[in-house]
Image (tube, grey):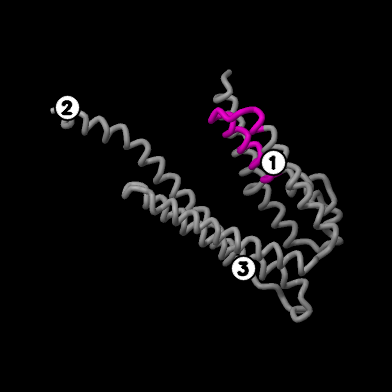
Amino acid sequence: MTRQRVGLVLFVIAVVWAIAWGAIVSLSVDSALNTYTMEELKETAWAMDGTLMMLWGLFGVPLGALVAGIGLWLHTGAKCSTILISGIGIALSIFVGLMFTSLGHFPLLFGIGGTLILLLFFGTVWFWARERAALGDAGVTAADLRLIGYVFLVITAWFTCGALSQPFATAFEGEAPISPIHIMIFFVLGWLFLFLSYYQSRQLAAAAPEKAAETEPAEEA
């Protein structure tokens, strides 16, 4: 089996794995969390320190996303060094990021992270603008869709920061947390427009050979 096929198989397995844990199993997790108290939850299969909860939280979607990336690198012919370094880097970043949760909440660090997100967003869209100016008419639609996706994702980051920091703020002690449904809506819109941008790019790439074939006879004449 070629590397391209191995990569495709890994990608399909990762998709099934991530959807199974992230969508189907999550229904059981949500049901348990909304049915039992913390003490009662300890007596179920979904105890917070139990094996199933660890598998769901650490090895569900995160592992699926990592394997999907590795599969697509293989499928597109990336070098083994690129796959190895990138895969290890992502895995270590996940591990280090999760280690920070045991250190408690640091508002200053939270603020620094938010500021970096903003700076990276504005830097990204600045380079996006330079790239769009150099595109032909055929490519600007895909680029515009990508910008909309970026905007929704940075808006999502802003509201996510607000929702996650609220439980640690003195002013909100004893207050009921707000529903994060708006955050989910913005997440979906952000990823939707990024998907549409790449879909549009793929359609243009597929149509390019046909257009070239149509113009060749006219040029020869």
Q: Which residue is mark 2?
A: 220
3D distance between C-alphas at marks 1 and 2: 54 Å
Give whichever of 170, 142 is nearer the camera: 142
What kind of residue is marked 1? Answer: Leu
Residue at point 80%, 57% (across, down): 101
x then y, percent, for residue 22: 65, 48
Mark 3 touching mark 1, by CB under 8 A? no
What kind of residue is marked 3? Answer: Phe
What kind of residue is marked 2? Answer: Glu
Q: Which residue is mark 3?
A: 159
Circle 1 Cα neighbour tier, 10 Å, few/some/many (<14 / 14–19 / ≥20): some
3D distance between C-alphas at marks 2 and 3: 58 Å
- Tell which residue pokes out farthest to the left in this image: 221
Q: Earlier in the sequence, mark 1 or mark 2?
A: 1
Question: Is residue 160 a member of the stretch shown in magenta?
Answer: no
x then y, percent, for residue 47: 83, 53
Circle 2 Cα neighbour tier, 10 Å, few/some/many (<14 / 14–19 / ≥20): few
Circle 3 Cα neighbour tier, 10 Å, few/some/many (<14 / 14–19 / ≥20): some
x then y, percent, for residue 4: 55, 25
For the record, the magenta segment spans: 60-83
Q: Which residue is mark 1?
A: 63
Position of the C terminus by quadrant: top left
Position of the N terminus by quadrant: top right
Question: Is residue 74 a member of the stretch shown in magenta?
Answer: yes
Residue at point 33%, 48% (across, down): 136
3D distance between C-alphas at marks 3 and 1: 26 Å
Q: Earlier in the sequence, mark 3 or mark 1?
A: 1
Q: Mark 3: which secondary structure? A: helix
